[in-house]
């Protein structure tokens, strides 16, 4: 429970009014006349986490005995309901007890609290079926259509389909192109994301939710040392290999060549989550996979990242150390709304490129391209086996 920013108490001829200021005036919000009790309730709201705590504070202030609290609660609830209806009080409705699912995505525990019809089907393979201490709780709550907030605070992202504003303890995320996905309140520590959606629930909303949840998940994942790379991945020689490139370059075509001619399993057709844990580069299964429909739930060792470029001939070129980190970072879609977030992403990219094979592959779309890259990977694997473990393998080889 929280007062909506942009409302202040002013006295007019000794009568108290709760009046809008700044952005709230621009939104044409209305004011409210307050009696003495209403004014006191407004002043006590910042000291209470919920209505029960507020009732206790109010009863203490007026020295109301226990037997008379029922009437006080009724009056207080009526006033709070009016504040909420007029957009002056942020008080999200509670999800149904026990609703939602527990998931393991990217090696991280997620509790999604929502009505069953609001849980995207893509999440079902990642459900664990058992309660766990979540790294992040995601709540999907119904909204009346009246925004619980405005785009106040420091504007971080402004695009046609996304608006991100930073406030002291949270980010307010708006989705202008989604008629039913109203907004998301994301705690800065990444432990809670609360989405407000407008009933009735239709199929486009599920798709919007699925992609919006990806945004807040990737925010939290970066705080846990994980970076999302726009890439297709395959599983070869007990390691994952990423083929990263801008859309349309041919990363799916290349991995499909491996699958067609070498029967190499494709792990994810569009997006991969990477990390470096105790010096070991890893790839983690996530449900987001573009239009490919190919995703994987497991975490696996990461052998390397191949950065693709279209060319009539097939050739590998080894980037410098700084280029490796930069090229991997450029393929990332993890949020970088602030300098601190960029630093986290840069740190993850540097740790991964320091621990696995990175190369730039210019290639065509024929079988020979997959055969060429397969031979390059086989050569590096052989070199690694033949070299002493103590020798640094950065740039030339990678850690198995």
Image (cartoon, grey):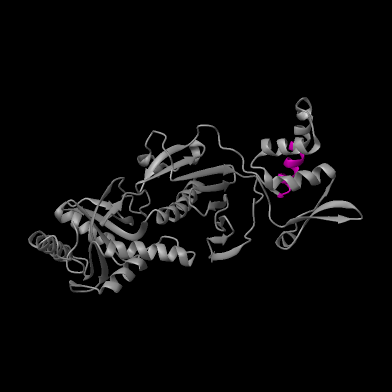
The N terminus: image quadrant: top right
Image: magenta residue range: 77-88
Q: Residue furthest right?
A: 13
287 to 310, vertically: above or below: above
Q: Residue at x 45, y 61 (%)?
A: 335
Q: Residue furthest left?
A: 386
* Left or right of residue 237, residue 101 in this image: right
The location of residue 3, given as percent across then percent down, is 69, 50
Residue 150 lies in the magenta-colored region: no
The location of residue 144, given as percent across then percent down, is 65, 45
Residue 78 lies in the magenta-colored region: yes
Nearest the eye: 119 or 18: 18
Q: Residue at x 74, y 37 (%)?
A: 77
Residue 274: quadrant of the picture: bottom left
354 to 60, vertically: above or below: below
181 to 332, vertically: above or below: above
* Left or right of residue 105, residue 94 in this image: right
Q: Residue furthest top?
A: 67
Nearest the eye: 268 or 31: 31
The C terminus: image quadrant: bottom left
The secondary structure making up most of the magenta span is: helix
* Left or right of residue 379, residue 306 in this image: right
Nearest the eye: 143 or 311: 143
Q: Residue at x 9, y 59 (%)?
A: 385
How many numbered marks, from 0 up?
0
37 to 223, vertically: above or below: above
The location of residue 250, given as percent across then percent down, is 28, 64
Q: Residue at x 72, y 59 (%)?
A: 24
The location of residue 107, given as percent across then percent down, is 34, 47
């Amino acid at each position: 429970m929280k007062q909506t920013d942009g409302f202040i108490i002013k006295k007019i001829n000794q009568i108290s009014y709760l009046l809008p200021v700044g952005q709230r005036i621009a939104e044409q919000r209305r004011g409210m006349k307050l009696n003495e009790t209403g004014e006191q309730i407004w002043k006590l709201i910042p000291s209470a986490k919920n209505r029960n705590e507020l009732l206790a504070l109010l009863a203490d202030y007026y020295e109301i005995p226990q037997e008379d609290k029922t009437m006080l609660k009724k009056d207080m609830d009526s006033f709070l309901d009016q504040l909420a209806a007029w957009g002056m009080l942020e008080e999200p409705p509670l999800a149904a007890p026990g609703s939602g699912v527990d998931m393991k995505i990217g090696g991280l525990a997620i509790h999604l609290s929502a009505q069953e019809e609001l849980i995207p089907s893509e999440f079902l393979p990642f459900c664990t079926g058992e309660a766990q201490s979540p790294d992040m709780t995601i709540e999907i709550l119904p909204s009346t259509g009246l925004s619980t907030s405005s785009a106040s605070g420091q504007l971080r992202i402004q695009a046609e389909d996304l608006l991100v504003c930073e406030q002291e303890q949270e980010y307010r995320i708006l989705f202008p192109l989604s008629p039913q996905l109203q907004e998301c309140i994301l705690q800065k520590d990444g432990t809670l994301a609360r989405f407000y959606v407008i009933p009735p629930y239709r199929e486009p909303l599920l798709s919007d939710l699925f992609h919006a949840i990806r945004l807040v998940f990737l925010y939290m994942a970066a705080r846990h040392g994980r970076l999302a790379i726009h890439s297709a991945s395959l599983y070869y020689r007990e390691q994952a290999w990423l083929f990263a490139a801008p859309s349309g370059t041919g990363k799916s075509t290349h991995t499909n060549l491996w699958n067609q001619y070498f029967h190499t399993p494709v792990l994810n057709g569009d997006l991969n989550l990477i990390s470096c844990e105790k010096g070991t580069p890893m790839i983690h299964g996530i449900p987001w996979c573009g239009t490919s429909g190919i995703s994987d739930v497991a975490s696996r060792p990461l052998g390397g990242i191949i950065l693709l470029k279209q060319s009539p001939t097939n050739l590998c070129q080894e980037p410098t150390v700084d280029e490796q980190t930069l090229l991997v970072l450029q393929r990332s879609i993890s949020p970088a709304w602030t300098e601190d977030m960029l630093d986290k992403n840069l740190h993850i990219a540097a740790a991964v490129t320091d621990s696995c094979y990175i190369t730039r592959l210019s290639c065509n779309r024929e079988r020979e391209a997959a055969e060429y890259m397969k031979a390059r990977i086989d050569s590096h694997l052989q070199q690694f086996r033949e070299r002493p473990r103590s020798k640094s393998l950065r740039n030339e080889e990678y850690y198995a």
